[in-house]
Image (tube, rainbow, N blue to C red):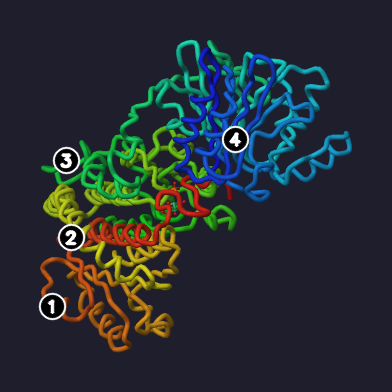
Amino acid sequence: MCGIVGYIGEKNSVPILINGLKRLEYRGYDSAGLGILTNSHSVVIKNKGKVSLLEERVEKSNLSGKVGIGHTRWATHGVPNETNAHPHYNSSKNLFVIHNGIIENFRTLKKGLEKLGYEFQTETDSEVLPHLIDSFLKKGYPLFKAVRLALTEVEGTYGIAVIYENEPDKIVAARKGSPLVIGLGDNENFVASDVSAILAHTKQVIYLEDGELVEVYKDKFIVKTISDAEIEKEVHEISMTLDEIDKGGFSHFMLKEIMEQPETINNSMRGRILYDKGTAILGGLTDVLGRLVNSKRIIITACGTSWHAGLVGEYMFEQFCRIPTEVEYASEFRYRNPIINQDDAILFISQSGETADTLAALREAKLKGALVLGICNVVGSSIARETMAGVYTHAGPEIGVASTKAFTSQLVVLSLITLLVARRKNMSQAEGISIAEELMALPDKINKILKLNDQIEQIASEFKDANNFLYLGRGYNFPVALEGALKLKEISYIHAEGYPAAEMKHGPIALIDENMPVVFIAPKDSTYDKIISNIEEVKARGGRIIAIATDNDNGIDELVDYTIKVPSTIKMLMPILTVIPLQLLAYQIAVKKGLNVDQPRNLAKSVTVE
Ligand code: F6R
């Protein structure tokens, strides 16, 4: 989704901003722009399309300046075009604003400003900001105060960065519901919506909280609340490295991230398994463990792939912890006035830690007094900071828009929580040890599955022109069916549905004919015989079948058209293995269709608007 980067210092800001915008491309965007304060005047260059196009234009213009802001836009109000791209500016074209988020009362604000004579050029909600700030500048306020007063009139969400020709020694930035970090350098400072944009220059950052504004100079910064109270901020050191956010020789981030999974799974487990005791240690949960173990109900809340991880978590928590568990879409949970009790534990799962619906659901749950926990990947993200306790997945930066390694790491963390809580309840040490053993064996098993990439590529060639796919699984592998279907539709634009296999005969079976590929997730477990019956039903109707089976299954090959064999593990961990061939299948199909795998159309990595 939209990205922000800003620079103030002694260097030419232009290449720094262009490189920062390139680092933000993975978030998904449709247009890009720069606003630069030069020695003589200010310049805005923006265009629909890629940052590379912006770079070409900037190079031709020889633009240079020591203060600047850059933006990648993901359209919410107004089509993606040059006019609607950011920065937006006031009529004198000396004040420039970039904005992430949505100004909900922009129509009211716009009407008021039009009455004052302000003319609007764009269809965006964001354009009210430069005019509104301008109206306070005209009353004689300095920039920082003008921005603060303007924001008191704004409803909605924002991360903004503002520069002003008449006060060229500062960038003013503010945050409400859309992340912003300030990067601290040596006689230079940065503003960004995501640390990856500034990681090449600094590892020292401060995180802005909702309702905070910052005045950033090249050698200092001042943070205030929107009600004008000055606040001290803690400086954080980022542990992420630049290598982690590069492609590392792979043709796509998505492939790199799929291939990294043996290592990322290890990182999610490292130091957290107490093998001899058959349990786990999760430092982030220590203070709340008693409350979690005694909770009467767990509600897992998330969106998209993280929601699928939550569904697997539900099976784990109910089977081993014997705590009733529900899984909710965050977008539904936040608005339907859910019944939340003091003895509920509500677990929010989010790779980015910035998903707007998940964050809003979290705030609602907190207000109602529940124990609010998080599983996040991005360290220091809003959800990580606002939950009472939680566990990081440590999967490293996930750049490909389609989530892969974050999902398997979420499943590992859910398994560790299960182990920790269940051992406090009824699980025996022996059972705990056997789960720990299986967890520790996962990286080697994933390595074996990744070697099937060539076989999966051949299957992808067979099916790349299909218009529809059905994914079927049972028990722990039903969420995997949903996740496999989501991966395929996200990056290959092929319509795909995931179902519990037994539901097929209640409707989807009507779709089955020789043009309908059906992917069965069919490991040898207690549901195996049932799923074989479902396979027979599809076969009888001429459907083409791809089965994800376990490598101890010799009988399945003659029933289906293609088999992808994965190693076996215990039922609760099987999704961590069965999902990997589905990630590869979606990837290979999208590549064969010549699509932009890492930045699929219309999608954003971090969905920071509703
Ligand atoms: C799918 C995908 C999305 C995200 C969803 C939630 O590949 O990436 O469905 O899973 O937008 O995002 P997070 O986990 O960041 O809250």
Query: Measured from the top left, where is residue 103 in percent x and y?
Result: 68, 42
| Nearest-to-viewer mark from 2 and 3 | 2
N-terminal of the pair, mark 2 or mark 4, is 4
Q: Which mark is first along the chain, 4 or 3?
A: 4
Give the residue at mark 3.
Answer: 274
Number of disc labels: 4
| Disc 3 from disc 1: Cα separation | 38 Å
Distance, label 4 to label 1, CA atoms, is 58 Å
Q: Position of residue 224 (x, y in %)?
A: 62, 21
Where on the picture, by quarter, is residue 201?
top left
Q: Which mark is residue 570?
A: 2
Q: Kindly report which numbered mark, 3 or 1, lies closer to the viewer in this rendering.
A: 1
For the point 65% across and 42% down, which residue is it?
A: 82
Displayed quadrant of residue 175: top right
Residue found at x 42% / y 69%: 496
Q: Earlier in the sequence, mark 4 or mark 1?
A: 4
- The residue to which callout 4 is attached is 33
In this picture, is 191 found above or below 23?
Answer: above
Specify the amino acid type for callout 3. Answer: Leu
Amino acid at circle 1: Gly
Amino acid at circle 4: Gly
Amino acid type of disc 2?
Answer: Ile
Q: Is residue 533 above or below residue 362?
A: below
Q: In screen coordinates, is 355 left or right of 111? A: left
Q: Of the residues tagged 1 and 2, which is closer to the observer?
A: 1
Estimate how packed mark 3 is, as few (under 14), some (14 to 19) or many (20 or more) residues with alpha carbons within 10 Å: some
Q: Provide the secondary structure element on which disc 2 rests.
A: loop
Q: In the image as oriented, which residue stretches furthest toward the bottom?
A: 540
* Residue 555, numbered label: 1
C-alpha distance separating marks 3 and 4: 51 Å
